[in-house]
């Protein structure tokens, strides 16, 4: 059994986290969010793109 990183995890390692957080802080991206942060949304959108999903609703629904 393969015990390394998944393809999604390997792709997300290329994201410069510091720059992303700096932009979120600069533009107040997490203002008035309770549980779903900008980072969570970015990761969901990246996963949706990688798996050719048509919307985030499909990724976030419990039935998929």
Image: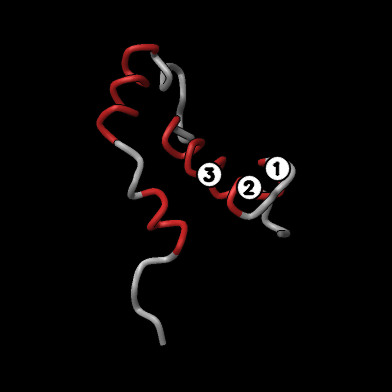
Colour approach in the figure: secondary structure
Which residue corresponds to mark 3?
46
Q: Position of residue 43 (x, y in %)?
A: 48, 43
Q: Residue at x 45, y 18 (%)?
A: 32
In terms of depth relative to the viewer, which is nearer, 10 or 32?
10
2 vs 3, front mark: 3
Q: Residue at x 35, y 19 (%)?
A: 23
Mark 2 and mark 1 in contact? Answer it, CB < 8 Å: yes
Whole-angstrom CA distance, mark 2 to mark 1, is 5 Å
Whole-angstrom CA distance, mark 3 to mark 1, is 14 Å
Q: Residues within 10 Å of mark 3 (few under 14, many from 20)?
A: some
Which residue corresponds to mark 1?
57
In terms of depth relative to the viewer, which is nearer, 41 or 14?
14
Quarter of the picture holding the N terminus: bottom left
Mark 2 and mark 3 in contact? Answer it, CB < 8 Å: no
Q: Residues within 10 Å of mark 1 (few under 14, many from 20)?
A: few
Q: Residues within 10 Å of mark 2 (few under 14, many from 20)?
A: few
Which residue corresponds to mark 2?
60
Q: Give the mark, 3 or 1, whose residue is nearer the N terminus.
A: 3
In terms of depth relative to the viewer, which is nearer, 27 or 34?
27
Quarter of the picture holding the C terminus: bottom right
Does residue 8 appear left or right of residue 54 in this picture? left
Q: Residue at x 35, y 78 (%)?
A: 3
Relative height, residue 39 to residue 49 (above, below) = above
């Amino acid at each position: 059994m393969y015990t390394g990183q998944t393809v999604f995890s390997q792709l997300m390692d290329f994201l410069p986290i510091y720059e992303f957080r700096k932009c979120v802080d600069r533009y107040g991206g997490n203002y008035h969010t309770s549980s779903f942060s900008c980072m969570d949304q970015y990761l969901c959108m990246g996963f949706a793109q990688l798996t050719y999903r048509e919307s985030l609703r499909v990724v976030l629904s419990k039935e998929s």
